[in-house]
Image (spheres, rainbow, N blue to C red):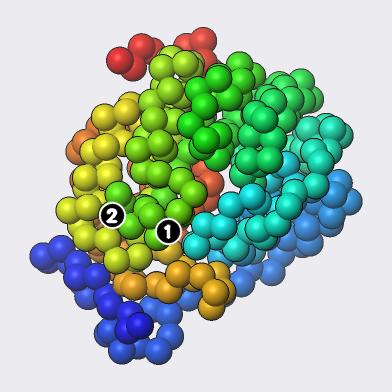
Amino acid sequence: MAIKIHPPPAGCGTGTTASAPRLPAWLRRPLPTTPVFAQTRNLLQELRLHTVCESARCPNHWECWSRGTATFMIGGDRCTRACRFCAVTTAKPLPLDPDEPRRVAEATRHLGLRHVVITAVARDDLPDGGADHFRRTIEAVRELNPGVVIEVLTPDFNGRAEHIATVLSARPEIFNHNLETVRRLTPQVRHRATYDRSLQVLLWARQIGGDRVWTKSGLMLGLGETPDEVLTALQDLRQVGCEIVTLGQYLRPTPAHLPVVEFITPEQFDWYGQQARAMGFRHVASAPMVRSSYHADDFQIEPRETEPDRH
């Protein structure tokens, strides 16, 4: 399939041509080489922790690990779903590791994180989808790291509000669940999920967590969506109270995954970011290399007790 370049808004610069055989220049970066990268890798190996950085083949993991940050992936490294954009292994999961919450807390302390992101594989094999494992991990991290901001990036728990409530009972500051793509493309991008279910998850998180939790979501662009569809998805997120949004370029992790349809220009990402801010999102990250937890600590929040009413 030929890759098209998404036309930038009027007045913006242009990107590469549609026939370019390589990634556009804005997606090519030198790999950082710092001692911190090796230290981060060694710590994660020593504590036997999985990260979405490695399992999902995130293109930013060299940069993040060189900054001494990582997104912890709990519940093992085997997912019960097979989303066509995701490189995480699909297989029958192993039993939960009861010591994993402690090790995540230890890694958070050793890395000196001020903002920790905890995600998980989908565990449809478990009655609660792994919600209580999230709760125990949040509590362990909080106990060993007072004052840390905890962000969770959760699966949809098959649309069960009680499981979302279990996660929120541990009082994470940010609840993130990704919409991933526009309504039209959802069936082919993640066939085991639905667009409306993801919106419902975010709405429940907003209703259950109230003003003590920020809700967040993300979209991948370049799968063939139109600008109008992206704007509609952003509006849908605002309608369920979502306050933080990330938009980044989809990059095919392996030849077995969905192909890239378009390379969106940085100027177009800037335009989407402007539109999102105009809709009322409190924090927006919109750029080609943005991922859901990339530079997550750039969004500075106050302690929950001092948060104003945001309704």
For label 1, the crowd category at 10 Å Cα-Cα, with few meaning under 14, some 14 to 19 and many 20 or more, is many
Residue at 40% x, 60% y: name it. 188
Mark 2 touching mark 1, by CB under 8 A? no
Q: Quadrant of the C terminus?
A: top left
Residue 249 sits in quarter: bottom left
Residue 275 visible in this rendered orientation of the protein: yes
Residue 232 sits in quarter: top left
Residue at 64% x, 46% y: name it. 121
> Please, is residue 203 above or below residue 279 in the view?
above
Residue at 60% x, 29% y: name it. 149
Q: Position of residue 132 (x, y in %)?
A: 69, 26
Instruction: Say what secondary structure mark 2 lies in.
Output: loop
Q: Which residue is mark 1?
A: 189
The single residue placed furthest to the left in the displayed view is 10
> Please, is residue 245 above or below residue 28 in the view?
above
Q: Which residue is mark 2?
A: 184
- Give the mark nearer the N terminus: 2 vs 1: 2
Image position of 262 (left or right of 44): left
Three-letter amino acid code of the residue under disc 1: Val
Residue at 22% x, 75% y: name it. 14
Q: Position of residue 239 (x, y in %)?
A: 26, 29
> Please, is residue 89 above or below residue 262 in the view?
above
For the residue pair 134 and 305, the one nearer the viewer reads as: 134
For label 2, the crowd category at 10 Å Cα-Cα, with few meaning under 14, some 14 to 19 and many 20 or more, is few
Residue 113 visible in this rendered orientation of the protein: no
Q: Position of residue 124 (x, y in %)?
A: 63, 41
> Please, is residue 265 above or below residue 80 in the view?
below
Instruction: Say what secondary structure mark 1 lies in.
Output: helix
